[in-house]
Amino acid sequence: MNFPAIRVIFQREMARFTRTIMESLISPVISTSLYFVVFGAAIGSRIETVDGVTYGAFIVPGLIMLTVITQSVSNASFAIHFPKFIGSIYELLSAPVSYLEIVIGYVGAAAVKSILIGLVILLTAYLFVDLPIAHPVAMFALLAVMSFSFSFFGFIIGIWAKDFQQLQLIPLLVLTPLIFLGGSFYSIDMLPGVWRSIALFNPVVYLMSVFRWSFFDTADVPIALSLLAIAAFTGLCLAAVWWIFRTGWRIRQ
């Protein structure tokens, strides 16, 4: 394992993060504060509690998950697409660096950025609500796993996209609707029977349910089923990344 190469890639991506600190860190904090004002105050005044939890606290896991998923995908997809777009990826591929080391460097940096942003949003939430965390170790583990999983997914999108327009296509048209319809700001048990059944086809529901369980010890779907869904999604992403480098799809073309 070429650890110096991994460190160089990782440090370069983290340096980009610090150079754009306003966009990367401050912007999500401001957005979170606005969500609390709109959802926590306006809607929270009409919905006092959900499953015995105040509505302001109830939406915190959803806000964290919304930001972590979008940031993981955005950071990882741009990180690999930009060198592919300008052609510098060929220099990286010709260097004595394995595909595994390239993936670890880019995905690791994207995931660490997302974890940091998620923790900052969590701290910001304490300025607005009294937030219990029933399972803090599980919460952090789930935050890390989902950050890495969606960073892998973003890495795939970055390889797939032929231009910057395509780079935004899946996050805007697929991920964002799935997140908002996945119980981020409500419990799917609040939906009528048929709509609740339809919601169960949304994979984000399972991610959101187990992450909210780590805070409030309540879940919309069985924990084991949620963990299985996370494992399946991560496994599919890993398999796709392996296949991309095995075949050179969209890299050597």
Image: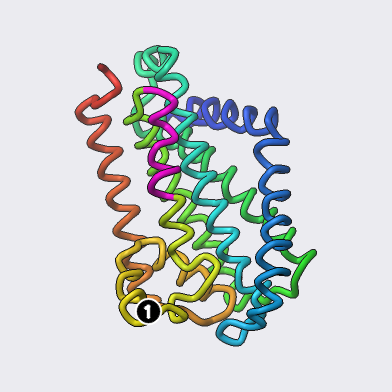
Secondary structure that dominates the magenta span: helix
- Label 1 Cα crowd, 10 Å radius (few <14 / some 14-19 / many 20+): few
Residue at the limit of the structure toward the bottom, as seen here: 52
From this view, report whether residue 106 is shown above or below residue 176. above
Image point (50%, 44%), residue name: 72
Which amino acid, mark 1?
Answer: Pro
Image point (40%, 76%), residue name: 223
Image point (29%, 59%), residue name: 232
Q: Which residues are magenta?
A: 163-175
From this view, report whether residue 60 is shown above or below residue 9. below
Q: Secondary structure at mark 1?
A: loop
Q: Quadrant of residue 203?
A: bottom left
Please identify the quadrant where the C terminus is shown: top left
Image point (38%, 41%), residue name: 170
Residue at the limit of the structure toward the left, as seen here: 247
The one nearer the camera, 216 or 58, is 58
Q: Quadrant of residue 93?
A: top left
Q: Is residue 233 magenta?
A: no
Q: Is residue 169 magenta?
A: yes
Name the spot of residue 34 as percent of width and height, x first: 71, 55
Residue matched to label 1: 222
Name the spot of residue 141 as percent of width and height, x first: 52, 62
Q: Quadrant of residue 163?
A: top left
